[in-house]
């Protein structure tokens, strides 16, 4: 992880300003900040193209949304990354849902979002091109986050978070500058908003 | 020795005749002129057999096979009709005064005879559906060596590079276009594409391009249209032509044509070899864009008159191609070089027997057998160990009986009955797989009045794997005037699921996914479950139902306007509504996080557009032509998702917004606008023919760049381009032919068009050896 930055979530600001003008909302709005995580390195196992066998197994990278940091497996991690697979911490009751929409416009957990946790036979964040967070483009051999896919996670603390994955390649390069042969993959750049008080709006 | 049924314009009384080529050889009998006898000649002084003379108020008279006719004793106005010639009108005085009547050939390609459209011979101007015919001159002026180079200069046709040079017609891919060689289907597709570079053009007489679905007579694959390649037939005259062509990228194309024959038979042999060093558009990477390859074609065609009323023809063709190249694998960290050797073979054998008991009946029995195989061997350069080995062998056999029956002078009925067997054995398939199918078709050609003609057809296909299919089509033409006619046709098209979609059993070891053909999905998933590999079933294969054929309904309408002797215009508008398009979708999730896929009927697509061709003869030795095609395509499911606000795009600043319908560019690899402009000029002093062509392909969607897999962003288009092509050719009086020229003279090349090598220069010579000896 190169840097961890905090960005002001612009939509939240505009929502905040708008709310200040509005008299019928007496509650003060806490502007939530979107956190940008850059280049979380979680490369996939090395697979022999000939036989399909895994020649070098790589570890999952465990990430805590609450702490905004990589942690070890025995700590309170929320998400674990390896290759294009994202697991959730089922032993700590972390659950996730994948919804469609514009990140800024998702101001609360939608009623139709179905949260699930990982089981023996399924992932809360589905794998495979088009199913979960990414598309694999067989014409350009690149993995690109599906625009409009937002991952909702209920963390180890029971707080809601919304996540948008921005890039799978090192340095978050513009898509047309990705060379699938030379640009290192398995480097996640994503942003997320965490609602710290257990309520379901962002 | 060509015994066929000819469906002539409606004025003909005797619609069936023998077009034996020998009868066209001048047989002028001088000195035997008798009173009232007239002879109908073409501009070169050769008699026109079987023309028709109509004297006002009298029954039309048939001209005999040597162009002669006896004048009636009285009359007023006289009209003389002949297929392919301008109708001549004479007063009674003029008629009496002339012993020889000369008819002028029709200009443009409207008089060309087309077989593909109705499986009987009809001229373009009588066909109620959109047809283009490319004759020998048109083929020659392109300087092309492979079929793709000829077709890419035609209005509304594109060549897309996807597992070979695939044709695109009316916005549909190569998968949906039937390619015929002398009327028989060619097999051998890779990922659906029929590679047009497999066809050498040196011995092509003409190419018929039929647009719009023709499943009503051809069945599967004829959804976008049909391309029929007609190879040369000599007329029993001895012939020995040798030719050599050379072009850029160290390409060589020697060929040999031999012909011989007698009164009752003729035979043709054709040999062609092509080799090239290939080219590379991305020199910074290992491996060429087009690898070096060598291709050899051998063809034998024998026609004979077995007995009166019986004709037999035999056609055999063999094709062999080898290529080799380099490839890199293993990623940037530990690159490994791979050597590839690929081979492709193709053998066709078609005997045809024709029996014509009388003027009303014609029976044609055709057999057609084809073998197609590919072999690809990839090895590590360092160790020589095998990296990948793929084999594919396909066999196709068809027996067909076609019966043509002349019900009345203005009605021709065609009935076809056929059976076919197809087998495939390949690395990626289990065992030897076999399909069985049967079909019949019925076609009725009818001229209900002087101005109207109608062609209607219906075909039923019965298939061992995907069930039954009915394909109707009806086409009509109305002649508004001698100069202007309007056509419309409405018909169904379909494409049967292929072996791959039904029977593939493929495991990509490298990334760990599986693909099962639809009929193997249940069994395949069960096996993976037994092995404990399945994490989650997404679709239960036992609930799938059978994979259905892809189907379409299409409407074509347009007009042909012959404004004057020198100018003509043809317009056709079309709309294809295609359903049940087959795509892959995941059916089970595996423990590894990968998926197992199978094939489903999911998509619906619309393609529509307008194609315009205009030609103008400015001077005797100068003609211009121009073509324009507008094409609009869309995936209806994508349109639905956009309308529901379910599709998003993200810009380079990572801002996401909803995709609107204005953003949506339709299907990838389709140019909304394309066209061509051609100038043909014969320089009279030197006798050199110049053909200058500018071929425009408008911008087209190349690949998804913003992650939503649809075409919705400027960055996802490849630029349009113009290819300027020039050919100069000259035929000496002894028959020796020279050509020189170049294609893509402006040298525009882009990796978005991997089949465009940039500028290509060429030189060629053809020597008619027997001509020179005599």
Image (tube, coloured by chain):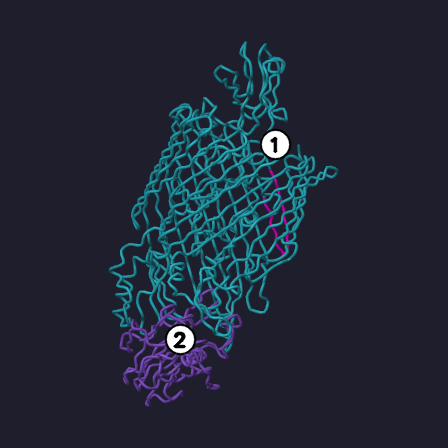
> What secondary structure characterizes most of the magenta part?
strand
Check disc 1 and report the residue beneath it. Answer: B565
Left or right: A104 as drawn, with respect to B239: left
Badge 2 density bin: few <14, some 14–19, many ≥20, Cα 10 Å? many
Does the magenta-highlighted stretch encompass residue B239? Answer: no
Q: What color does chain A have in the rendering?
A: purple
Q: Which chain does the cyan colour mark?
A: B
Badge 1 density bin: few <14, some 14–19, many ≥20, Cα 10 Å? few
Eye-nearest disc, 2 or 1: 1
The furthest residue to the front: A23
Q: Is residue A62 visible?
A: no
The furthest residue to the right: B685
Residue B103's x, y, as percent? 60, 24
Q: On screen, B107 above or below B516?
A: above
Q: On screen, B757 above or below B156?
A: below
Q: On screen, B682 above or below A171?
A: above
Check disc 2 and report the residue beneath it. Answer: A84
For disc 1, the chain is B
Left or right: B613 as drawn, with respect to B359: right
Residue B108's x, y, as percent? 58, 36
Q: Residue at x 43, y 83 (%)?
A: A35
Residue range of the region highlighted in magenta in the rendering: B240-255
For disc 2, the chain is A
Marks 2/1: CA–CA distance? 67 Å
Does the magenta-highlighted stretch encompass residue B244? Answer: yes
């Amino acid at each position: 992880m190169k840097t961890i930055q905090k960005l002001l979530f612009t939509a939240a600001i505009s929502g905040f300003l708008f709310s200040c003008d509005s008299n019928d909302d007496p509650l003060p709005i806490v502007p939530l900040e979107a956190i940008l995580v850059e280049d979380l390195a979680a490369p996939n196992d090395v697979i022999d193209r000939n036989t399909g066998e895994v020649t070098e197994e790589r570890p999952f990278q465990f990430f805590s949304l609450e702490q905004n940091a990589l942690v070890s497996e025995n700590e309170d991690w929320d998400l674990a990354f390896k290759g294009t697979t994202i697991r959730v911490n089922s032993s700590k009751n972390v659950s996730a849902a994948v919804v469609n929409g514009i990140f800024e416009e998702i101001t609360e957990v939608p009623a139709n979002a179905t949260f699930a946790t990982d089981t023996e036979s399924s992932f809360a964040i589905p794998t495979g091109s088009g199913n979960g967070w990414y598309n694999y483009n067989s014409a350009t051999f690149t993995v690109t986050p599906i625009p409009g896919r937002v991952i909702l996670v209920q963390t180890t603390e029971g707080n809601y978070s919304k996540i948008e994955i921005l890039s799978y390649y090192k340095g978050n390069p513009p898509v047309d500058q990705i060379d699938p042969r030379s640009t290192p993959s398995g480097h996640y750049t994503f942003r997320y908003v965490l609602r710290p008080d257990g309520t379901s709006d962002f | 020795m060509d015994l066929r049924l000819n469906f002539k314009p409606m004025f003909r009384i005797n619609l069936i005749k023998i077009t034996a080529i020998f009868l066209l050889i001048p047989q002028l009998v001088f000195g035997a002129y008798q009173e009232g006898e007239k002879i109908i000649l073409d501009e070169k002084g050769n008699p026109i057999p079987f023309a028709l003379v109509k004297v006002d108020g009298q029954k039309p008279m048939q001209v005999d096979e040597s162009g002669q006719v006896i004048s009636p004793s009285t009359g007023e106005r006289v009209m003389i009709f002949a297929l392919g010639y301008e109708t001549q009108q004479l007063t009674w005085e003029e008629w009496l005064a002339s012993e020889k009547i000369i008819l002028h050939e029709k200009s443009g390609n409207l008089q060309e005879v087309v077989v593909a459209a109705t499986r009987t011979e009809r001229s373009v101007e009588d066909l109620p559906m959109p047809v283009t015919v490319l004759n020998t001159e048109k083929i020659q002026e392109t300087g092309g060596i492979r079929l793709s180079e000829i077709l890419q200069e035609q209005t509304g046709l594109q060549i897309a590079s996807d597992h070979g040079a695939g044709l695109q017609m009316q916005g549909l891919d190569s998968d949906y276009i039937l390619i015929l060689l002398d009327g028989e289907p060619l097999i051998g597709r890779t990922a659906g594409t029929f590679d047009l570079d497999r066809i050498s053009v040196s011995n092509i007489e003409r190419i018929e391009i039929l647009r719009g679905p023709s499943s009503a007579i051809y069945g599967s694959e004829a959804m976008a249209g049909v391309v029929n390649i007609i190879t040369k037939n000599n007329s029993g005259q001895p012939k020995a032509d040798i030719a050599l062509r050379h072009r850029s990228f160290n390409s060589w194309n020697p060929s040999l044509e031999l012909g011989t024959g007698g009164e009752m038979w003729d035979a043709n042999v054709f040999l062609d070899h092509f080799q090239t060093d290939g080219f590379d558009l991305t020199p910074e990477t290992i491996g060429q864009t087009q690898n070096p390859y060598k291709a050899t074609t051998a063809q034998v065609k024998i026609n004979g008159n077995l007995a009166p009323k019986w004709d037999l023809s035999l056609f055999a063709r063999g094709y062999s191609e080898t290529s080799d190249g380099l490839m890199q694998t293993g990623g940037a960290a530990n690159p490994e070089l791979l050597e590839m050797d690929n081979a492709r073979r193709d053998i066709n054998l078609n005997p045809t027997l024709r029996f014509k008991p009388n003027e009303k009946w014609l029976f044609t029995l055709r057999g057609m057998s084809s073998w197609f195989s590919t072999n690809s061997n990839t090895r590590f350069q360092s160790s020589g160990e095998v990296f990948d080995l793929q084999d594919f062998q396909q066999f196709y056999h068809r027996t067909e009986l076609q019966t043509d029956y002349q019900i009345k002078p203005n009605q021709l009925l065609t009935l076809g009955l056929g059976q076919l067997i197809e087998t495939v054995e390949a690395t990626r398939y289990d065992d030897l797989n076999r399909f069985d199918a049967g079909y019949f078709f019925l076609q009725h050609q009818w001229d209900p009045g002087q101005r109207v003609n109608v062609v209607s057809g219906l075909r039923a296909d019965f298939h061992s794997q995907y069930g039954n299919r009915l394909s109707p089509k009806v086409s009509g033409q109305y002649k508004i005037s001698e100069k202007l006619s309007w056509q419309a046709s409405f018909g169904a098209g379909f494409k049967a699921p292929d072996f791959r979609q039904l029977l593939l059993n493929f495991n990509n070891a490298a990334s760990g996914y599986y693909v099962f053909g639809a009929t193997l999905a249940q069994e395949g998933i069960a096996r993976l479950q037994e092995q404990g590999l399945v994490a989650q079933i997404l679709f239960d294969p036992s609930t799938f139902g059978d994979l259905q054929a892809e189907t379409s309904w299409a409407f074509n309408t347009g007009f042909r306007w012959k404004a004057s002797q020198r100018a003509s215009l043809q317009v056709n508008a079309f709309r294809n509504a295609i359903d049940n398009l087959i795509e892959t979708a995941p059916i089970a999730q595996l423990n590894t996080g990968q998926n197992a896929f199978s094939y489903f009927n999911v998509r619906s697509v619309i393609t529509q557009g307008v194609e315009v061709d205009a030609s103008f003869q400015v001077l005797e030795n100068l003609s211009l032509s121009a073509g324009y095609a507008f094409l609009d395509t869309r995936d209806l499911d994508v349109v639905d998702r956009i309308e529901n606000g379910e599709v998003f795009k993200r810009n380079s600043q990572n801002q996401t917004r909803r995709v609107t319908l204005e953003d949506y560019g339709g299907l990838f690899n389709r140019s909304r606008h394309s066209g061509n402009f051609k100038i043909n000029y014969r320089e009279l002093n030197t006798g050199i023919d110049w053909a200058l062509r500018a071929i425009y392909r408008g911008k087209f969607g190349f690949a998804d760049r913003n992650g939503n897999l649809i075409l919705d962003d400027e960055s996802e288009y490849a630029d349009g381009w113009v290819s300027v092509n020039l050919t100069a050719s000259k035929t000496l009086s002894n028959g020796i032919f020279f050509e020189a020229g170049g294609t893509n003279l402006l040298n525009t090349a882009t990796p978005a068009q991997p089949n465009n090598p940039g500028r290509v220069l060429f030189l060629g010579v053809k020597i008619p050896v027997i001509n020179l000896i005599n």
